[in-house]
Structures are given as C-alpha cells and as structure tokens.
Amino acid sequence: MILFGANQANSFFQFVKSLAEPLALFFPGLFNLANDNLETIVNYGLAAVFWIVVASFLARLVSR
C-alpha cells in the first residue's frame, strides 16, 4: 500500500501496518536506500522470503 501511495491515516492502512510490522521482525530498516519504494520492497521482501523458508522447513518437518 505504501508503494501505491495509500492514505496512511486510513484505519485499514493502520490495521495492515500493525499486522505487517511484527511479522517483518528485524528486516524493516535493515537496508537504508535512497529510494523509499525500493527500500520497502527489499526490506519487506526479505522478511517474506524468510517466512517462506521457515514455513517450508516446518512443512517438511511435520510431513515426516
């Protein structure tokens, strides 16, 4: 939503942001880039990749 310029004062935006921040762990702010959109993509993208790897590991562990 940040990438598309959503109104940050909107309650739905705040709700999604409140869910995203704890799930992103320490990744937001990991890289400080000049382009804010690229920084958001990189930092939250790394968090998404991390959770995909963790979920894959847990799925293999449970399936055995």
Image (spheres, rainbow, N blue to C red):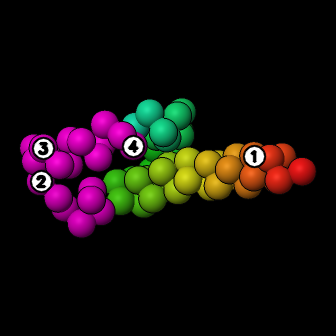
**Labels 3 & 2 near each other (Cβ < 8 A):** no
Q: Which callout, 3 or 1, points to the residue nearer the camera?
A: 1
Helix, strand or loop status at disc 4: helix
Q: In the image, which residues are magenta? A: 1-20
Q: CA distance from mark 3 to mark 1?
A: 34 Å
Residue 26 to residue 5: above or below: above
Based on the displayed image, in which of its 4 quarters is residue 52 positioned? bottom right
Q: Residues within 10 Å of mark 3 (few under 14, many from 20)?
A: few
What residue is pinned by disc 4? 20
Residue 57 to residue 30: above or below: below
Q: Which quadrant of the figure contains the N terminus? A: bottom left
Asked if residue 46 shows in the view, the reply is no
Q: Which callout, 3 or 2, points to the residue nearer the camera?
A: 3
What residue is pinned by disc 1? 58
Helix, strand or loop status at disc 2: loop
Q: Residues within 10 Å of mark 1 (few under 14, many from 20)?
A: few
Q: Which label number is shown at residue 7? A: 2
What residue is pinned by disc 3? 11
Q: Earlier in the sequence, mark 1 or mark 4?
A: 4
Helix, strand or loop status at disc 3: helix
Q: Earlier in the sequence, mark 3 or mark 1?
A: 3
